[in-house]
């Protein structure tokens, strides 16, 4: 039990320091591209990295599911975090936007590689304390890093420059890897991988249960209608309701909200189970109308609700995947879930971006339809779970 607790805390610190590193970089990467002479189109191409990152979640899940070895799982986590973290300080040495863009894309690919297997490990070490609470605590630590990283970057830029800020971010990157070493040496073998005969079980039961399949479809519907932060901020900048220097405060508000709600959301999940996510499509639905209300108070409220949705996504919605899969199929499940969710979010926001330009009332109608479909699919999933 002591080793499990140490591994859990170490994994939380891994995420805290990792978020300091890459969220710190993400807070100024657009300005860095502009400094390197890149166009707005090139700056927007970082979305390619987001897409590839989600593709790599599927690849990582499949590799881990096929090889099923503790060494492979931890190896993928190490590889992913190493690429994810050290691409950031290397940005300080780039002299053109091409190399900077490559590093930004590599950072997202690294995150994609390590996320599914990290979640499998986290699902196992939180089993004894309650997965909802465990994922909630982990998300709180994660978001502390997401707030501290941009704050560290602001300080470093004030002292020197953006390049200096990227170099400073090597410190939390190394701290994250140190905590990862502690976690992997404390909990080197996953119990679920030490059993024999898992391959036969997977073939007999299938990789995804029917309930999990419906749940993934529900999450695809939800993400198709959930506005991405980049489009959110595009609107804020376009309508000019806030000075550009104050726009990052909306992100800080969202990240702080995410951190505040993460543990309560996880605690509620442990009490009532997947029913706790029923409110998520409704929250995602009202975010866009609030945003388009074009008042500062509405923008702040939309930022808070966006943070709540992300808090639920990072805790309860991830825990459902673990609860609806077996230890033998969990890596596949997380990989497929991440791939589908990310792909749907990208497609959905492309559609939303087009509708934003063409007709904002149509955009609201689209969001309502997607989130209502998501709610229907979640209810159907809950009925399947109750019957099983």
Image (cartoon, rainbow, N blue to C red):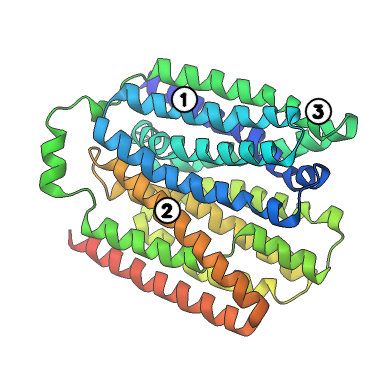
Please state which of residues 11 and 349 is positioned toward the viewer in this rendering.
Answer: 349
Q: Nearer the viewer, residue 278 or 92?
A: 92
**Quick one: label 2, few (<14), some, or many (20+) residues within 10 Å?**
many
Above or below — where is 256 with respect to 291? Answer: above
Mark closest to the chain's N terminus, 1 or 3: 1
Q: According to the image, label 1 marks what residue?
A: 78
- Relative height, residue 108 to residue 48 (above, below): above
Q: Where does the N terminus fall, quadrant-wise?
A: top left
Report whether 159 appears left or right of 4.
Answer: right
- State how far apart marks 2 and 1 are (Cα): 25 Å
275 to 360, vertically: above or below: above
SS under mark 3: helix
Q: Is residue 144 visible?
A: no
Q: Helix or strand or loop: what does disc 2 sit on?
A: helix
Distance in Å between CA atoms under marks 2 and 3: 37 Å
- Residue occupying the point 55% across, 21% down: 177
Residue 128, x across and y down, in percent: 34, 33
Q: Is residue 232 visible?
A: yes
Q: Which residue carries the number 2 mark? A: 317
Between 378 and 292, the one lying in front of the other is: 292
Residue 38, above or below 18: below
Residue, x 76% and y 48% (percent of image)? Answer: 38
Q: Nearer the viewer, mark 2 or mark 3?
A: 3
In front: mark 2 or mark 1? 1
- Residue 4 lies, in percent from the top left, at 38, 24
Residue denoted by label 3: 164
């Amino acid at each position: 039990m002591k080793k499990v607790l140490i591994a859990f805390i170490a994994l939380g610190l891994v995420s805290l320091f990792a978020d300091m590193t890459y969220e710190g970089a993400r807070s100024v990467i657009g300005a860095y591209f502009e400094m390197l002479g890149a166009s707005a189109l090139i700056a927007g191409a970082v979305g390619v990295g987001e897409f590839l990152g989600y593709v790599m979640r599927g690849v990582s899940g499949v590799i881990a599911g096929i090889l099923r070895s503790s060494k492979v799982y931890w190896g993928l986590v190490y590889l992913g975090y190493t690429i994810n973290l050290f691409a950031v300080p290397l940005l300080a040495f780039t002299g053109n936007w091409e190399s900077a863009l490559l590093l930004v894309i590599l950072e997202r690919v690294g995150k994609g590689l390590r996320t599914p297997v990290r979640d499998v490990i986290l699902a196992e070490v939180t089993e004894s304390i309650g997965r909802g609470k465990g994922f909630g605590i982990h998300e709180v630590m994660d978001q502390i890093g997401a707030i501290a990283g941009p704050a560290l970057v602001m300080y470093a830029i004030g002292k020197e420059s953006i390049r200096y800020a990227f170099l400073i971010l090597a410190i939390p990157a190394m701290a994250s890897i140190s905590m990862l070493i502690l976690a992997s040496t404390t909990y080197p073998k996953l119990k679920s991988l030490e059993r024999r005969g898992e391959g036969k079980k997977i073939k007999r039961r299938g990789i995804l249960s029917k309930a999990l399949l419906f749940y993934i479809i529900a999450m695809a519907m939800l993400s198709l209608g959930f506005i991405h932060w980049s489009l959110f901020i595009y609107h804020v900048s376009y309508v000019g309701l806030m000075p550009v220097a104050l726009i990052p405060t909306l992100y800080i508000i969202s990240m702080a909200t995410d951190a505040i709600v993460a543990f309560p959301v996880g605690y509620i999940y442990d009490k009532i189970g997947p029913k706790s996510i029923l409110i998520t499509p409704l929250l995602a639905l009202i975010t866009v109308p609030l945003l388009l209300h074009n008042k500062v108070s509405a923008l702040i409220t939309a930022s808070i609700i966006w943070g709540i949705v992300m808090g639920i996504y990072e805790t309860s919605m991830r825990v459902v995947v673990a609860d609806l899969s077996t230890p033998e199929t969990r890596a596949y499940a997380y990989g497929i879930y991440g791939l589908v969710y990310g792909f749907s979010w990208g497609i959905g926001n492309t559609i939303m971006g087009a509708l934003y330009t063409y007709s904002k009332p149509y955009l609201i109608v689209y969001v309502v339809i997607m989130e209502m479909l998501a709610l229907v699919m979640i209810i159907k999933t809950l009925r399947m779970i109750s019957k099983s």
